[in-house]
Amino acid sequence: MAFRVIATEHFANQLRNAPGELAGYVSAVTAVLRVDPTVASAAFDVVRSDEEYTAIFAHGRGFLIYWVPAGHDLVLLEWLVWAG
Amino acid sequence: MIWNFTGFFQPVDDPPVFNLMKAGRAFPVRFSLDGFQGFGIFTPGHPRSETVACDPTQKDPVEETVPALVSVLLYNPLNDRYTLSGRPAAPGRRPVGGWCSSWTTAPPTPPNSGSPGNPPHPHGRVCVREYGRCGLSCTLVRMSSQPTPEPVELPEIPPEERAELEALKQRILAGDYGGTIPWDDLAAELGL
């Protein structure tokens, strides 16, 4: 069963203005989140705080904050940070 | 001024216990500095991990481990706990039978305090073994150490944005998805 993935307007605008490398990372991370957003994968680490998670990728240069409300099979992509 | 360091807390047991965990994992190192003291809390060269001789007489499994991909430093104001994901040092060539390491932080010294800093605070030793290769004896073999990566500070969403975000979440829980974009639509727009 796949999770429904949606993004905030802020996140969408961040991604529209992001370099191609970052967009590629986010696409890959999101593909994993769609399957199970609550676990880390071999490609990135995840830090959890209640229902909010931070995926850390690109060797600590990129952070994707997302929300997984309990019982909703939903992922909200909230915030993106890129250190280049 | 020297901060009031307490710890380390579970799941790591204090010496003389050897904390036992499997190779390829990290362990959460929890401690308190009596309040939030920022993230620049370690003296240069710390925290660090080095391999040591094993004492198999007292050992305890690390009950909680995390993936050993990135070293992260967090602070939880609810329980006044710093958490650092620690990775035990591994020898350059992993010996059959596992190895042991000692993970150490230096109790932090505030900037411009004029203090030479506290002596390193040794914490429970972490004994590592390979899957299916050895028992718990952890025979000591010639060791070398491996540098510990710099901690990563997690980003924070600005407070004003956070308030908007929380309101959006409440609407989503009520079934109103206004103000959001399906990922598939965004990905298609950007050619991802």
Image: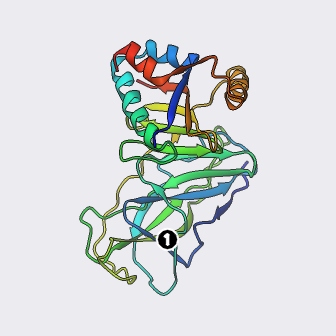
Number of numbered discs: 1
**Residue at the spot 68% in from the left edge and 21% down from the top edge:** B161
Q: Is B113 left or right of B138, judged from the image as shown?
A: right
User: Which residue is at the front of the view, B11 or A35?
Assistant: A35
Q: Which residue is mark 1?
A: B125
Position of the C terminus of chain A by quadrant: top left
- Colouring convention used in this rendered image of the protein: rainbow
Which amino acid, by three-letter code, is at mark 1?
Arg
**Residue at the spot 45% in from the left edge and 82% down from the top edge:** B55
**Residue at the spot 41% in from the left edge and 42% down from the top edge:** A44
Q: Position of residue B60 (x, y in %)?
A: 53, 77
Chain where mark 1 sits: B
Q: Position of residue B144 (x, y in %)?
A: 31, 64
Q: Position of residue B160 (x, y in %)?
A: 72, 20
Is B123 rendered above or below residue B78? Answer: below
Is A68 rendered above or below residue B31? Answer: above
User: Which residue is at the front of the view, A75 or B26?
Assistant: A75
**Residue at the spot 45% in from the left edge and 18% down from the top edge:** B185
- Residue at the extreme left of the image, as rendered: B93
User: Which residue is at the front of the view, A7 or B69?
Assistant: A7
* Quarter location, residue B145: bottom left
- Residue at the extreme bottom of the image, as rendered: B57
**Badge 1: how crowded within 10 Å, few (<14), some, or many (20+)?**
many
Q: Position of residue B75 (x, y in %)?
A: 65, 45
Is B113 rendered above or below residue B16? Answer: above
Q: Give the SS element for disc 1.
A: strand
Is A6 rendered above or below residue A71? Answer: above
Q: Is B113 left or right of B62, judged from the image as shown?
A: right
